[in-house]
Amino acid sequence: MTGCLAGRVALVSGAGNGIGQAIACKLAGEGAIVGVNDLKPEFTTRTVEMIRAAGGMAEALPGDASKRDSVRGLVLEMAARHGRFDVIVNNAAWVRYGSIASITEKTLDRMVAIGFAGVVWGIQAAAEAMAETGGSIINIASSAAFLGMPNALTYCGIKAGVTGLTRSAAAELGPQGIRVNAIAPGSTQTEAVMAMLDEEKIAMRVARTPLRRMGRVDDIAEAALYLASDRSSFVSGSVMLVDGGITHAFS
């Protein structure tokens, strides 16, 4: 650890498990004060306890990432409490896969509300809090934004949309010293993903990946640390593929 985020204030949505949890722990491990957001209070508490047990600083901030007022309230609460706001990671998502014919209004509305609108509200709130000081906005997209995946119409569309939000926000907010980037993970070993795949499907994904393994949550967390820190001070509007090379591999 280098302490490269010492004194910085961050918020990570969807940080109760998986990639969000790993990112929250990574930022806290480098000295940031991390607001841990998730819809379920018990999930936020679990991550906060992990961070504190490792010597980091974190606060539980349960709330609905799909609601504008909720997101704005959490960001401004962190900014007011600590006198600054430096990093937001818009990670929260709700995902359901299925054929085009199986898509319902309820499923579509829920996925878009959290995975797309939630990113908009996160960008908007962070831009307000960072207006005078600058900062880093990190959106979690997916390699699915670049791939034609069957049975994932809504998911692919939302993640492609997140990359578009990222580029537009980077252009608009750059003059205020606010950097906006996205991370696009490939297949990553989260509990949710591993529960969905059998051994055959795992082996197939590994075989198609040039680096011959699936991603780990810490791979994504390291990318988030880079984008949150001053090491990426001239990086904005980028979508960083963290996918082992699978997106652009021909196989």
Image: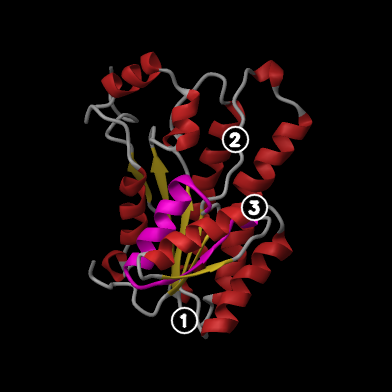
- Residue positioned 71% across, 32% down in the render: 107
Q: Which residues are magenta?
A: 16-41
What kind of element bears circle 3? loop
Residues packed near mark 1 inside 10 Å, few (<14), some (14 to 19) or many (20 plus): few
Q: Quadrant location of the N terminus?
A: bottom left
* N-term mark: 3 or 2: 3
The residue that label 3 is drawn on is: 40
Q: Residue at x 56, y 60 (%)?
A: 45
Residue highlighted by disc 1: 133
Nearest to N terminus: mark 1 or mark 2: 2
| Image quarter of residue 248 | top left
Q: Is residue 228 visible?
A: no
Q: Is residue 38 left or right of residue 177?
A: right
Quarter location, residue 229: bottom left
* Magenta region includes residue 31: yes
Give the mark nearer the N terminus: 3 vs 1: 3
Q: Give how far apart the Cα atoms at labels 3 and 2 are.
A: 16 Å
What is the C-alpha distance between the residues marked 3 and 1?
A: 31 Å
Residue on which the image places disc 2:
95
Of circles 3 and 2, the one toward us is 3
> Which residue shows up at 41% across the image and 55% down it?
23
Q: Which mark is residue 20?
A: none
Residue 170 in the image: x percent, y percent? 47, 61
Amino acid type shown at disc 3? Lys
- Please determine whether, in this image, residue 172 is positioned above or below residue 250: below
Magenta stretch holds residue 193: no
Q: Is residue 112 above or below residue 80?
A: above
Query: Of tags 3 and 1, which is closer to the observer?
Result: 3
Residue farthest toward the right in the current orientation of the protein: 105
